[in-house]
Amino acid sequence: MSSQESDMLFETINNAGVVTLNRPKALNALNTSMVSQLLPKLQEWENSKHLVLMKGAGDKAFCAGRYEIPYIAFMNGITMGGGIGLSVHGRYRVATEKTVIAMPETKIGLFPDVGGSYFLPRLPVNLGLYLGLTGDRLKGKDVVKSGIATHFVPSQRMYELEKLLTRCTSDVEIRGLLSKFNEPCDDFSLAPNIKHINYCFAAGTVEEIIERLEKVKNDWSEKTLKILSDMCPGSLKITLRAMQRGAQLELGQCLRMEYRIACRATENHDFPEGVRALLIDKDNNPKWNPKSLAEVTDDYVESYFKKLPEDKELKFLESKL
């Protein structure tokens, strides 16, 4: 990408507004500039276009509210962090064999944000709680089987699909076209352990989840126990609490709750320490505080959820959330 080329590309093609996240060398990760460019364009197109297509430049990564017109996310590649937020809340989410999704925030002392507290607890058989706590990755057709994506289309057909979608003038046409390109997703890599996921992650506390996993006694449960033992203890409890509450909240309420948690996370020890250990020094030896689940008190968890001063609370431009 040349120094003159924008990190966010906007095109009008036939009846569609097309957004391309254009930082392929950074896996199309969002930055402040991209976010500030995106909102006014989406507001403009909401009144003038029949649909919006969102995609990432290159074929390695897509990106590591409510919208009145159809919003279609092409999740072709790594889809994490902001990429989840830009895709999973849309009406149509198209995965390919290159799609990789994960919410690995508990490993860096954070929590699944960008609406994770809303969509994760709404996935079937407690799959969202499993994904949110363990950060496990789903790939390809598994993303559809989990309910995170709505359609599966081979990557070599994505250009053709995009071209035809830009000619659509109604949601009925869009649904029909996506159905025509969609391939069946019969197998699910987590199927052999789905009953264990449903049972273990239905528990009301992280400690109970661990107790149930210890009773399963198979390769999957041993691996899952090891993963959880490497996660930030405070993040595990905060994440579980957020998803338990988020299951009863609207999306906007979840985003406000997550904003409060994120503000507290930036003020406390674990998030900076997780970033240091995994992303900066890369010694993979974070010193969590509290250092164990037993030391993470209910008062500690609740402190992350308390309302901010009124002038610091998250506010939306419109009340649709």
Image: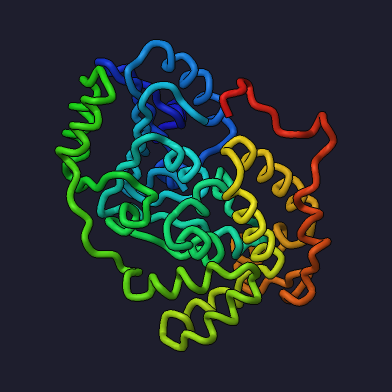
* Residue at x 36% of width, y 37% of height: 73
Q: Quadrant of the C terminus?
A: top right
Q: Is residue 232 above or below residue 89?
A: below
Q: Is residue 44 above or below residue 150?
A: above
Across and down, in percent, residue 7 comes to 46, 31
Across and down, in percent, residue 165 comes to 23, 27
* Residue at x 61% of width, y 77% of height: 229
Across and down, in percent, residue 304 comes to 77, 52
Asked if residue 258 shows in the view, the reply is yes
Across and down, in percent, residue 272 comes to 72, 58
Query: Dividing the picture into quarters, in which one does residue 205 lie?
Result: bottom right
Query: Dividing the picture into quarters, in which one does residue 92 lie?
Result: top left
Q: Is residue 174 above or below residue 26?
A: above
The answer to which of 176 and 85 lies nearer the viewer is 176
* Residue at x 22% of width, y 36% of height: 178
* Residue at x 46% of width, y 43% of height: 83
Q: Is residue 302 above or below residue 21?
A: below
Asked if residue 275 shows in the view, the reply is no
The answer to which of 149 and 232 lies nearer the viewer is 149
Q: Quadrant of the N terminus?
A: top left
79 left or right of 242 in image: left
Q: How is colour applied across the structure in the image?
A: rainbow
Q: How many marks?
A: 0
The answer to which of 312 and 80 lies nearer the viewer is 312
